[in-house]
Image (cartoon, rainbow, N blue to C red):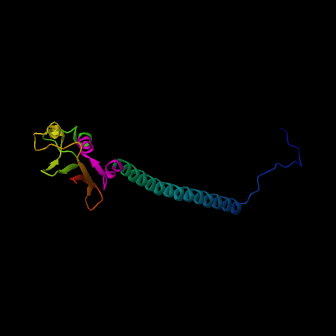
Amino acid sequence: MVYRKGDTMKANRISDATKILLLAATTIITCVIASLGMIGMRSAKELNKTAMAQMRDLNNSLKDSELKKYDGLEVTGSDVINCIKKYLGDYVSGETAPLYIYVKTKLTENTYTNGSQIKNIQNFTHTYYIKPTALFTGEVVKNENDVILGIRFTNK
């Protein structure tokens, strides 16, 4: 490129003060955007905690709903036997299930904590026998934290 006498080169004539103001404005805008992002992250974190707590409560509620159905329900002895098989049948002698089942018949009272007596509850000569046609009233036993500890069946 050849310059002639009288031609002037165009130069960026932004003053230093203008440059400083632009830098300051850019820095402020960047800080505002970053703080908005942090606020959004905190809100999302709190929302996530709340959602997880609600899902945990819902899951516990669904798990307990099968047990809660026995509260105040009138059932037959075969329903009681099936309940013992379902909730305690996988636990062998020496193990303790997370809940117990208490059964009070006209003749005996027994607390079942595992499936070791399942054979005996159907043997009418044994003290653990539960008459399949007998009527029982169920009651769910909870602790002070509303956690189900067991089910109590009382012969009518």
Residue 85 vs residue 123, the one in the foreground: 123
Relative side of 66 to 51, left or right: left
Residue 24 vs residue 70, the one in the foreground: 70
Residue in the image at 48% along x and 56% along y: 47
Across and down, in percent, residue 13 comes to 77, 56
Disc tally is 0
Task: Tell me the magenta residue range.
Answer: 64-84
Quadrant position of the N terminus in the picture: top right
Quadrant position of the C terminus in the picture: bottom left
Query: Is 81 inside the magenta-drawn segment?
Result: yes
Taking 33 as reference, is 117 above or below it? Answer: above
Across and down, in percent, residue 36 comes to 57, 58
Residue 87 vs residue 118, the one in the foreground: 118
Query: Is 120 inside the magenta-drawn segment?
Result: no
Residue in the image at 76% along x and 53% along y: 12
Across and down, in percent, residue 76 comes to 27, 46
Residue pushed farthest front?
133
Residue in the image at 33% along x and 52% along y: 68
Across and down, in percent, residue 141 comes to 25, 56
Per the picture, the main secondary structure of the magenta-coloured stretch is: helix
Relative side of 137 to 112, left or right: right
Relative side of 2 to 66, left or right: right
Relative side of 60 to 24, left or right: left
Q: In which quarter of the image is residue 25?
A: bottom right
